[in-house]
Image (cartoon, rainbow, N blue to C red):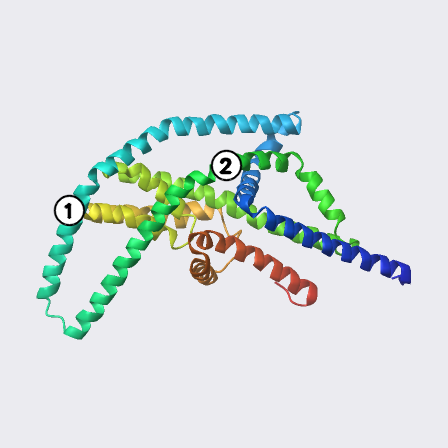
Amino acid sequence: MAKLSPWQIKTNYLRLALNLILVVLVLYFLYLIRGIFLSLLLAVVLAYLLYPLVRLVEARGMSRTSAILIVYSAMFIILAGLVLYGMPHIIEQLYLLAEVVPGYTSKVQELTASLQVEYARAGIPEAVRQIIDERIIWLEQMLVQMAEKVVQVIISLASYIFNLILAPIFAYYLLKDVEMFTERAALLIPAPWREDVQYLGSEVSRVVDSFIRGYLLVSVITGAMTGLALALLDMEFALMLGIFAGVTNLIPYFGPFIGAIPAIALALLVSKWLVLKVIIAFIVIQQLESSIISPKILGDRVGLHPLLIILVLLAGGQLFGLSGLILAVPVAAVLRVVFIFAMNRLWPEYNT
């Protein structure tokens, strides 16, 4: 290997310093535009989902711009159809929910009163009863806080409309010039590190792509099965409960249990047999999802041990709430790729 001259060494250090300054400026710029960070995040997700379709249309002789516009048009038609079909049903169920809330409230009060009577007859020691009462009060407070947060989220959704509109615009430019962005970003990397960084970037992209496309598809299938099963059981709000189950299914392991809570709570106000049927339906759907659907779609591409997934989910939920639960697994998977890459480069004898 030829020895570098002092001028070449100074030039390399100067390039490294300029790249570091550029990275700092980019991070500072991202901080300044943090208000549209959600739009950028949604744009990246949208670009990951649509890129294979764009390449497929482009392979038929279309230009990149024409391919993107065709995919966008098809996406708009599908979304418009779903909105035109689904929105009236959702609005109808929201009106129905507003009408039946008083009835459900009285049923909850009756159920609570009967439980209190049974609780008083149980002959539980005073010390134990005090502990149970404290836990019940804590649970009630937690449920009230959760309900308030849900209302706040629903109210604040209107402020995100602008972000939702910006996301497809950003995604358009990402899809149009993704190769140019990649090539120019590669030029900023010092030549000795370029190959390693590009390899690391491709591995990270593979993991993120697997998570976004795979988990979204699994969640859509799970939500559809849940809504259909609850509709067959003549459950009220089956559509909304199915959508909720699909969204919460993005959370590995804990998602199916969270998604089942509203359906079981509503069934409890109807009859014990309906509760049993709903529980059986969720168990069957969860088994189908975990044993057939997820392995076929996801396989083992995320590459995390189940115990590690549970730990990062607990940490993500504790630190960042619902967003932490959803992002914990892909972030952990990316960090795993970076860790393995670093181990292989620093200690080549370490074989992963």
User: In the picture provided, is 290 more to the left or to the right than 37?
Assistant: left
- Residue pointed to by mark 1: 106
User: In the picture provided, is 182 more to the left or to the right than 95?
Assistant: right
Q: Residues within 10 Å of mark 2 (few under 14, many from 20)?
A: few
Amino acid, disc 1: Ser
Q: Residues within 10 Å of mark 1 (few under 14, many from 20)?
A: few
Question: In which quadrant of the rendered image does the C terminus lie?
Answer: bottom right
The residue tagged with tag 2: helix, strand or loop? Answer: helix
Coordinates of residue 34 in the picture (x, y in percent): 56, 48
For the residues marked 2 and 1, what is the alpha-carbon distance in whole angstroms?
Answer: 40 Å
Coordinates of residue 284 in the picture (x, y in percent): 31, 47
The residue that appears at 42% across and 41% down in the rendered structure is: 157
- Residue pointed to by mark 2: 162
If you read the primary sequence from the N terminus, does the residue marked by circle 2 or circle 1 appear first? 1
User: In the picture provided, is 194 more to the left or to the right than 2?
Assistant: left
Amino acid, disc 2: Phe
The residue tagged with tag 1: helix, strand or loop? Answer: helix
The residue that appears at 36% across and 50% down in the rendered structure is: 149
The answer to whether residue 348 of the structure is visible from this angle is no
Front position in the image: 52 or 8 = 8
